[in-house]
Image: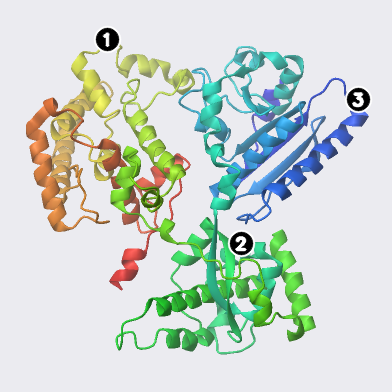
Amino acid sequence: MDLHEEHEPFPRSLPDNCVEYVLFVLDDVLEPRSLLAELENVRKTAMQLCASTTENYIWQRDCFQLQIKRENGLVFLQGTTDYGDSIEDEWLVVYLLRRLTTTFPSLWVRVSDSDGEFLLVEAANVVPKWLSPEIDSNRAWMHQGKLQLLPLSASSGVKRPLALAEAIEYIRLHPDALVYSPFTEAEAFYRLEKYPEGIKASMHHSLVTIPRKLAHILHEQPAAIAPAVEAFYLRDPVALRPMMTNSPDLHFPPNDLVTVSVRFSKVLFAQVKSQRFAAPPLWSNIVKSAEAEPEAHPISEQERKTSARLELGMKVTSGFEMLARSTDGNTNRLAREFAILLQDVEEDGDEVLPTDEDIKGWPNADMEDDEAWLDINFEDFENELEGRRQKDGAEREKGFGDLGAQADLRKIVSRFEAFLNDETAGVEGVELDDMDHDNDSSDDDEGGEGEDDDESSEDEDRAVSFDEDQFNRMMREMMGLPPEEESRLSTATSREGLQGRWVDDSEEDEEEEDIRQIAAQMEAELKELGALQLDVNPQGAKVLTSKESAATKDKGKSNEQAGEESGDEEVDIDYNLAKNLLESFKSQAGLAGPAGNLLGMMGLQLPRDEDEDEDEE
């Protein structure tokens, strides 16, 4: 029995938001008894590298970790990191592993997550054509800082996934036969370019007003902020129950408050900052006094900051209160360490707590970073997409996001464009590889489109890759890409392709008529709302008003009259695509929807934006 046949029936899958990494030392010179010593040496070096590189880094859930493992006759190092909502943790792990392979020439490393070989997903546009998601398992390896691929010959020329033991055996016997492509490597490691500087940039310092006891614990264990924010972010009525009474029996009652600087990751800060949270009874009077009589006199900037720090401190303290009551059975290492530290502080009493003078002497005691990165200005957003540079360096720093954000936005747009402009796609959907339709070859021969279609049909396919009604409606809502004439032509093409699959002629006519009526009604409604028009000159507002919608509609009419002669130069497709994507995602109000689902399939997660809802209230 082949190795791949042995493991295929029960494939092991990782939990969501987890990255797994395996490290092999492949050196023929090493004796088996020396292998364990070498693996332990690699493990210690890796942990030292992690400690020095991520000294002030806040991990979302799990940190980088390695253990020696034996499986199917193989001895190697293995680790799993749960990165939660922080995709930065996953790429930081990849960065550490890549650096480690440059230290040990005989080290081979593979990383994967719930999506499989996510490095190949990043480089999907430049990987060899024969390599598809169905067969890429265990084919991507990091060695001496490079990304190398096991060729098709590793599976005897058959398109199938490889077992781990198969991949290791092939690397042992044919280390020089692996495929190396600078283009694939550049795409796969694109997100690593910002490290190690990006580690510091992913942190955020904020002043918060919290009880003195909690300030002492955070000073002793800054990383404890991660499980506390998660406890607050994922709270339920049971966790809130102890704080919903006037009982002073709390670990962190709102007494003896001090203002200190707390270090968050940007993901953690966004999670706690964006949450709406009614003040618990013991905090309500304190919070109300800070916000008293807002209409009697204008609130000064200092008063606004004081109120914001108190509100943020209330959320952080509530998170720690919930964490303190849930440490029993908690598998999180930081949560257990926090419970031990809290017990020691409560046993020692107030004598161990710092004085105000002690707090002033702490490093970065008054550090507070700008929160502008939480906001999006659509004018700066458009400039970033178009790559426009500000005249002044200081002005450029105020723009939307940073170089990483600009690159990510362009990647979103390029992936959608590549998806929609896939000329190989027919009514059956996008054809990624021969592997995707081997089982349906007869259907493809009957209903697939030939390669010698006329030029007009190719133009239509280029505008809309496939004409499924549901996808067409979804893309119209988000992007407004297909013009009215092309939409009608595309619908006609779709009907012609589907006629070969319909048997009953009478039912076919009725269904076509229903589809035409529904499409016409929906198109009229979308046009009335301005969803199908392209507004290339936004006036800086985050949400289109009725006047802007009317202006957009007029511009759309003029563009239709111009026809194909105007070309794409007058319409910034990239800007409108990304803008409409964000607006569609925002309209979901944090719930599931088409924009969120499509971005999620591409590995992109966007935070909720509740600013406008708060303003309305």
User: Percent x, y for residue 547?
Assistant: 12, 56
Identify the residue under disc 3: 31
The residue closer to the viewer here, 594 or 346, is 346
User: Percent x, y for residue 290?
Assistant: 44, 85
Q: Is residue 484 above or below residue 26?
A: below
- Distance from Cα at disc 1 to Cα at disc 2: 58 Å
Amino acid type for the residue under numbered disc 2? Ala
Q: Looking at the image, is mark 1 or mark 2 earlier in the sequence?
A: 2
Residue at the image point whose x is 33% and y is 47% from the top: 381
User: Percent x, y for residue 455?
Assistant: 21, 15
Name of the residue lying farthest toward the top: 452
Amino acid type for the residue under numbered disc 3? Glu
Amino acid type for the residue under numbered disc 1? Asp
Q: Is residue 159 above or below residue 506?
A: above
In the rendered structure, find residue 452 and report the number of the disc placed on it.
Answer: 1
Q: Looking at the image, is mark 3 or mark 1 earlier in the sequence?
A: 3
Identify the residue under disc 2: 226
The residue closer to the viewer here, 305 or 36, is 305
Q: Which element carries disc 3, helix, strand or loop?
A: loop
Quarter of the figure with residue 57: bottom right
Horizontal side of 333 relative to 307 (left or right) equals: right
- Distance from Cα at disc 2 to Cα at disc 3: 43 Å
